[in-house]
Image: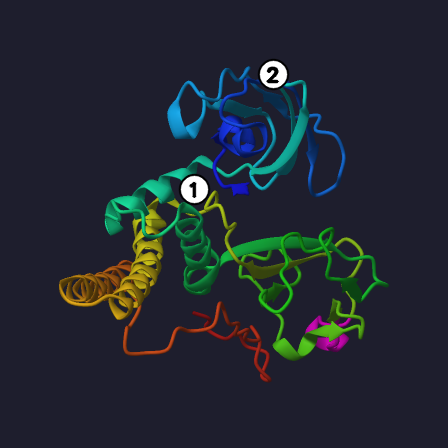
Amino acid sequence: MIYKTAYEQRNVTRDFAGKAGLGNSITLVGVTAANAKTGADATSAIIAGAAVINTADSGPCGGPAVGYTVLGGSPGDLYRITTKVTTSAGESLEDDLLLQIYSQTFEEFQQAVADRIQDHAHKLSQEARDACIREAITGRYSAARPVKLIVDIAGDGVTYDWPINNANFPGWVMNYSIVEKVEYPKGQQEPVYLWPDDWMLYDNGDNSLSFRMTGSAVTGGAVPESGETMRITYTTPHAEDGSDVPAQDFYGVANLAASLASTRLAAIYMQLGDSQFGGDAIEYKDRSARYRALAADLFKAFEAIFGLDQEQTQPAASHHAEWRVDNEAGGKRLIH
């Protein structure tokens, strides 16, 4: 199981009760953690646990929960936690869980979605709700308001090609990121932007790209000179935990995520309605219709906040349009 919040409690007794038997006592022996991405032992995170008492004390849930807290770490870090316990019969048991650290903003999105859909029957699991939040953030919201990053490249009079990787273009996402504009030389009072035919994204043939200068020296698009800097602006999607969503966009994204969740709830109730008879079927289909209507209203609210036209197709994540600042006669163009 993957937990999506920064601080999560894990009921170990519920996990092990089926193996140990409800009448047995389970005692926590130890907790170890390793970064699931690298396999290395966790150094910046400390996993704290507490002892588990008799599994029969708290009914079907079986005993008190054991709380695990991650101290340190960063949003996006994923840890595999191995829990070891012993039973009163002397049996040693082990189990794993995955805990992913998400930002406080993600927890706020969780609450905002819950407030909007009012799914008190919990027909939609928390994992499904979280998936709607991530889909909203990295999908349509990122298409409407992508993150814009800037990288400065120092010229040396020789290099004209730079691999697009995390070192040169941090956060670049294949098949998503787009170069919006290229300023060269950087720092002019009136910014000078290169024409699109002065540069290109070159396909290296191995599922990788390079940013390549292709223009002539006359237009400044050949090779950046030593002492000059080229500034490239490009787009990336937002982090799926919402940590980089501006405060002014929060409610719009929450509306979008809740709209997606409402659509899923409508499908769930429609399925229940199809499998029931009599009054239950009518009630479930009525709830399905209400959630469809709620989904439409929430989506309209999202569009209203971001000024999107519901009748038109969502535009691409970004586009670019660079203009020469000089014309053939040598005069300056007026740039908007």
User: What's under tag 1, amino acid-wise?
Assistant: Phe
Pick whichever, 178 or 232, lies toward us: 178
Height in image: 310 above or below 27?
A: below
Q: Position of residue 320 (x, y in %)?
A: 53, 72
Question: For this rendering, which residue is in front, 269 or 43?
Answer: 269
- Residue 69 lies in the magenta stretch: no
Q: Residue at x 71, y 53 (%)?
A: 166
Residue 63 seen in the figure: yes
The residue segment tinted magenta is 213-222
Q: Is residue 214 above or below residue 226?
A: below
Q: Nearer the viewer, residue 161 or 177?
A: 177
Q: Using the rendered image of the protein, determine whether residue 306 is visible from the camera's viewpoint.
A: no
Residue 88 numbered tag = 2
Q: Is residue 221 magenta?
A: yes
Q: Is residue 144 left or right of residue 119?
A: right
Residue ranking furthest to the left: 279
The reply to whether callout 2 and callout 1 are in contact (CB within 8 Å) is no
**Three-letter code, disc 2:** Ser
